[in-house]
Amino acid sequence: MNTEYDFIVLGTGEGSKYIAWTLAKQGHRVAAIDRKYIGGSCPNIACLPTKNVIHSAKVASYFFRSEEFGIKKDNVSIDMQSIRNRKRKMVDGLIDVHLNNFKCSGAELIMGQARFTAPRTLAVTLPDGGTRIVQGDKVIIGVGTRASIANIPGLAESKPLTHIEALELDHIPKHLIVLGGGFIGLELAQAMRRFGSEVTVIDRNRRLARSEDEDVSQALQELFQDEGINLVLGAHITSVAGESGRSVELRILQNGTERTLQGTDLLVAAGRTPNTEGIGLDLAGVELTENGFIRVNERLESTAPNVWAIGECAGSPQFTHIAYDDFRVIRDNLAGGHRVTTGRQVPFCMFTDPELARIGFNESEAKAKGIPYRLAKIPMAADLRTRTLSETRGFMKALIDPESGHILGFTVFGVSGGEIMGAVQVAMIAGLPYTALREAIFTHPTLTEGLVALFSSAHA
């Protein structure tokens, strides 16, 4: 069967699904192809399921702190199957929403493994074993990334967990070893510790979140140590033995000394690899970077005519909200606009408890670029709402242009940090000086009210 379309969208992740739905609603004939996860990784195996499980861990932490709030507890236990089922129920609901959106938009959803056989032509191996050939006037590639498994002797053979399998656990690991101190590793490490696992985090860098300022790294390290999570930093794994889920032994080189570390389960969360291998991109005329990402310009156009790449496989920052903005870049340019990926804001939030969120420059980046700034910084305890919540850990700080008063960057390590950041980001988008937030009348007591205290501290 050979079918022609105006647009073929390979992948149904954040950017891909929105471009498929939008183009189909405009009257174009659109085919969206995905091999497994309808709607991509975010609603199925990544962002939303992870935050669902993290919230269960937060509730668990409240139970273990219950006396602090005047509530006595007896016989508290964690049921991982119920936690998993709550997550699955949410995912099922999200899949239904996506299926309905495909139906209502008019975009045809094709499930199967696709591979280019020629420019803008793909062969799709269907679940029943059949093959379907599809051709498109234009093609948008959004195949995403996957967890990287480093070439360490014995690592692949140990069958380690990735975030996908970790979110499907029906038991509490006795001793979980986490390879990688990035977003995924730290979020899941804390959650599993709160469920009752012994947890060890191993990272090759000498401090957590090394791209952040040292005060952020120190605060994260203190948080994890206070929660009883073992940190092995500045360490390199030389070999792995055993099988995750039973028993694993890691040989580690740290500070010139070799030692072994034993655990029951192993989670790999040390980088991402683009899913660009084996899909015939060379036959499509699509070039890759040396790291395997699709080579694109600032308009997300690939090296092949009428072929775009979107999201993580295009080398865009690995956040769902950036993939959504990639969709807007392609959408607007197809309509005759000139929207680019350069110079855009890249906010992020790591959903540890408390959260770490940032928009714009941090101090390290400003100093490296020679950008002058005034610093405003307060402990989270200065935000009075945190005292009512018994969530006073952390701080927030802002970098201010000494001439214009515009906000150059904002970092918060504190309760609901991502929500607080949103207010600062809106001010940055509007080009408001920091005094606009300093003089604002925020409701008392709310977390956003703490921005008044933060920006008032800039006078010190």
Image (tube, rainbow, N blue to C red):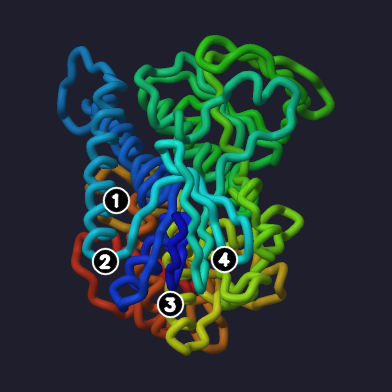
The numbered mark, 2 or 1, whose residue comes first in the sequence reads 2
- Look at discs 3 and 2 and give the one toward the viewer: 2
Mark toward the start of the polypeptide (1 vs 3): 3
- What kind of residue is marked 3? Arg
Q: Amino acid at mark 2?
A: Ser
Find disc 2 in the rendering and name its residue. 105
Q: Is residue 411 above or below residue 245?
A: below
Q: Quadrant of residue 340?
A: bottom right
What is the secondary structure assignment of the residue under circle 1?
helix
Q: Earlier in the sequence, mark 1 or mark 4?
A: 4
Name the residue carrying label 4.
120
Which is nearer the N-term, disc 4 or disc 3? 4
Q: CA–CA distance between discs 2 and 1?
A: 44 Å
Q: CA distance from mark 1 to mark 4?
A: 55 Å
Q: Which residue is mark 1?
A: 386
- Judge from the rendering whether residue 81 lies leftward or rightward of residue 403; answer left or right: left
**Mark 4 or mark 2, which is nearer the start of the sequence?**
2
Instruction: Tell me: 105 left or right of 358.
Output: left
Q: Which quarter of the rendering shows the N terminus?
A: bottom left
Q: Which mark is residue 331?
A: 3
Q: Which three-letter amino acid code belongs to the residue tagged 1? A: Thr
Query: Is disc 2 placed on a helix, strand or loop?
Result: helix
